[in-house]
Image (cartoon, helix red, strand yellow):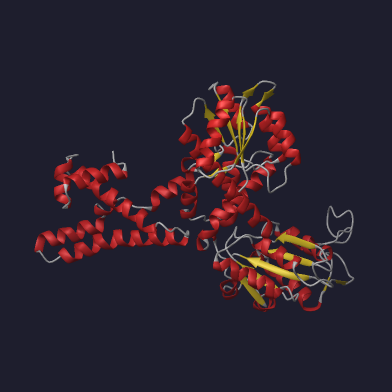
Amino acid sequence: MKPIWIVDDDQSIRFVLEKALLRENLPSRSFTHPREVLQALEKATPEDGPQILVSDIRMPGGSGLDLLAKVKEKLPSLPVIIMTAFSDLESAVSAFQGGAFEYLPKPFDVPKAVELIRRAVQESQREEVAQEQLAAAPEMLGQASAMQDVFRAIGRLSQSNVTVMITGESGTGKELVARALHKHSPRGDAGSNGPFVAINTAAIPKDLLESELFGHERGAFTGAQTMRRGRFEQADGGTLFLDEIGDMPFDLQTRLLRVLSDGHFYRVGGHQAVKTNVRVIAATHQDLEQRVKEGVFREDLFHRLNVIRLRLPPLRERREDIPMLTRHFLRSSALQLGVEPKRIADAALDRLSHFAFPGNVRQLENVCHWLTVMAPAQVIEAKDLPPEVLASADRRTPDVTEIAASPVPQLAASAAASDGVGSAVADTAVGGAWELDMALHAHALLDAGRTDVWDVLTKQFESRLIRVALVHTKGRRIEAAHKLGIGRNTITRKIAELGID
């Protein structure tokens, strides 16, 4: 493990931290001046450089904030903890604005300081693993089995230039897959050495789409001052990606079919056939079979495009990828904005992993961009997530009292009270509701890769049950324990363990 670097002009501070870290089997290296740190960084190799930097903020002949800025230029992902005996607002703000991991006021509690350093070490190690994963998969990320199937299909298709139809909901990354298919296609005619041209057929007005695809001759229509090459000509020798093909006007579908059949087309207003050699990759979020039945999409064009179909899973079917994608997008957003990448707490990741993401990966990317700008601290907590995520999380788990007050249980309970026959129905109605919700919650946790599902659900169940009993008894603990069938010592201990107010 790489050492923790400590820089402080106070020998006693250095001594105390060195000994405390030694007891925790954490190697350290000490400096008395920022200049020594910068000199050591110049000579350091990736193997013996710092894992963490712990620096005083005010030292004779040097500033911890200046050191922070210079270190971040060389090692932007290095966690830096700033120590100071001057606990003023300006110092704290300056430290965090400079990208500090944490701000530690003196005098500090040594065990808490060591705990903070260990947390920074864990964060540093997670960042290193994430960077390795990013380097290993720069184009597309995904560990879920559904995405692995997509990767395998791209690998198999890398040996041919066959036409591919990509299906999937909006925001799942269909263009990324198209670019990957182009990049890994064989070199040569209509291969990876040619251009990649993309067009969204739903985003261009019908009157302009024909000219966009096939180009036009000079004077073909008002405003056509010069001859213009269309997307098919621009993509000659490469790949043309037709996004949202299901929205293409019916009359243009006929022209597209002709190009796919013999590789010839006419520019708008032209009389001379133009030949092109293009691999076509189409994509849609619609059910093309249904559109064929409705008569708005040509069946022969559908079969021409649907040689190989590749389905992209929605994000809700690959929830285990959300943590990896979130960290990737946070780094990307920080790079775009020229700021320090923010880190995200496990509780916030858990909330994100349970969000439905109707906009799929594109929506997650937008959320990460929002968090990079709007989250108040370097570590994103659950409370910092966008309102739509928090609102969805609040709706996800129905309250027990809401279930008990729902129309179906009340109706069944009334039947039970009136004739003594409906008790089993009432039990089924109430039990079915909360059991189904618990099952869905358990599925979501398991899909997210959690390994503490038993503890999470048990604590939630016990907490909710005790809260309802306390409401029923107006806060009288002994009576609540009696009604629940547990001892008063048990309910007192549970209230403390579960943090029930």
From the top left corner, tell me how far across and down residue 440 is, in percent.
38, 61
Which residue ends up furthest to the left in the rendered image?
419
How far across and how far down the image is residue 67, in percent?
Answer: 68, 30
Q: Eyeballing the image, is 298 above or below 119?
A: below
Q: Look at the picture and state if 350 lies above or below 202.
A: above
Instruction: Answer yes or no: is residue 376 visible.
Output: no
Camera-nearest residue between 58 and 259:
58
On the rendered structure, is 14 left or right of 305?
Answer: left
In this orientation, does residue 23 appear? yes
Q: Does residue 60 lie above or below 266 as drawn? A: above
Residue 411 locus on image (x, y percent): 20, 59
* The C terminus - image quarter: top left
At x 82% / y 75%, what residue is drawn?
263
In x, y percent, where is residue 115? 48, 39
What is the tally of numbered marks visible in this picture? 0
> Is 415 on the left-hand or right-hand side of 6?
left
Q: Which sits in the foreground, 146 or 393?
A: 146
Q: Please tell me which residue lies in front, 56 or 146.
A: 56
Q: Say which quarter of the image contains residue 496.
A: top left
Horizontal side of 215 relative to 302 (left or right) equals: right
Q: Going 23% across and 58% down the picture, which residue do you hit?
A: 409
- Would you identify the image quadrant in which residue 52 lies? top right
